[in-house]
Image: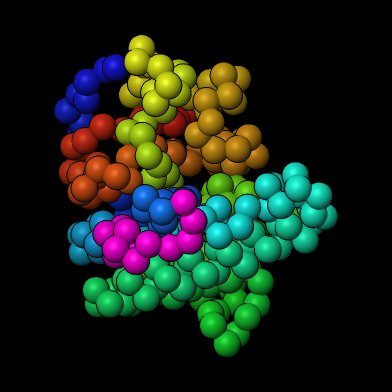
Amino acid sequence: MTSAAPQEPHTFKRVMLKISGEALMGDQGFGLHPPTVERIAQEVKSVHDLGVEICMVIGGGNIFRGLQGSAQGMERTTADYMGMLATVMNALAMQSALEGLGVFTRVVSAIPMDQVCEPYIRRRAVRHLEKKRVCIFAAGTGNPYFTTDTAATLRANEMSCEAIFKGTKVDGVYDKDPVKFDDAKRFDTVSYDQVLAQRLGVMDASAIALARDNNLPIIVFSLDEPGGFKGILAGEGTYTKVVG
């Protein structure tokens, strides 16, 4: 395992934070764990306090995952729509936690549901960011067969984000699973093509290809490391950068 070399501080104006739904369930096997949601909200606030404009996309795997539903005999399109609705629940939970910390937040859904959140209108979402509100993009792309990784990359491009921060359970991208293999090597930087060719599992292939085609860096870091998100912006911590 390679040690973290000191890095130059990053000066990002606007970033996308992508986290899985599983990140919100803590040690539970399912659902939302409010103290964990609160902890992640504190991480987001610490970066927001630096003046960085933040978009978020949260998966729905802690509630329902479309692929698993279809694997159990459910029609794929229906299962994917259920997964999209799960992401709205997670987004509302994160909005509640952030606003409890005094951070103005908007949930913006690709599937209109006016009673609980705003529909996705690109220019309105950009305006929220300019007003220093956190924008949580929910319901994926609004289309089945696309993951929330792809939704995060799409929205990051539409919002002119300078990087995607992918919060995971490990502190970067490894050549094999570091949980299973003690000799797993972490990359400091890795190319989009290498991620695709070696199936390194950073994001699904369509998300990586979309990031590559628009030259959008992906920074993979551990969400379990307190202060990790803010630390990267100060040039500290351990992470992997996926670039061209």
Residue 202: in magenta span? no
Residue 42 drawn at (x, y percent)? 24, 62
Q: Quadrant of the N terminus?
A: top left
- Between residues 18 and 16, which one lies in front from this camera angle? 18
Residue 31 drawn at (x, y percent)? 48, 61
User: What residue do we see at 37% from left, 39% from top?
Assistant: 169
Residue extent of the magenta highlight: 29-40
User: What residue do we see at 44% from left, 38% from top?
Assistant: 217
Residue 30: in magenta span? yes
- Between residues 244 and 241, which one lies in front from this camera angle? 241
Q: On the rendered structure, is 230 left or right of 243? A: left
> Would you place residue 82 above or below residue 120 in this image?
above
Residue 50 position by quadrant: bottom left
- Between residues 58 and 133, which one lies in front from this camera angle? 58
> Would you place residue 217 above or below residue 190 in this image?
below
Residue 214 position by quadrant: top right
User: What residue do we see at 27% from left, 59% from top?
Assistant: 39
**Residue 145 seen from this side:** no
Report the label total. 0
Residue 44 drawn at (x, y percent)? 29, 59
Residue 102 position by quadrant: bottom left
Residue 244 drawn at (x, y percent)? 48, 28
User: What residue do we see at 39% from left, 68% from top?
Assistant: 94
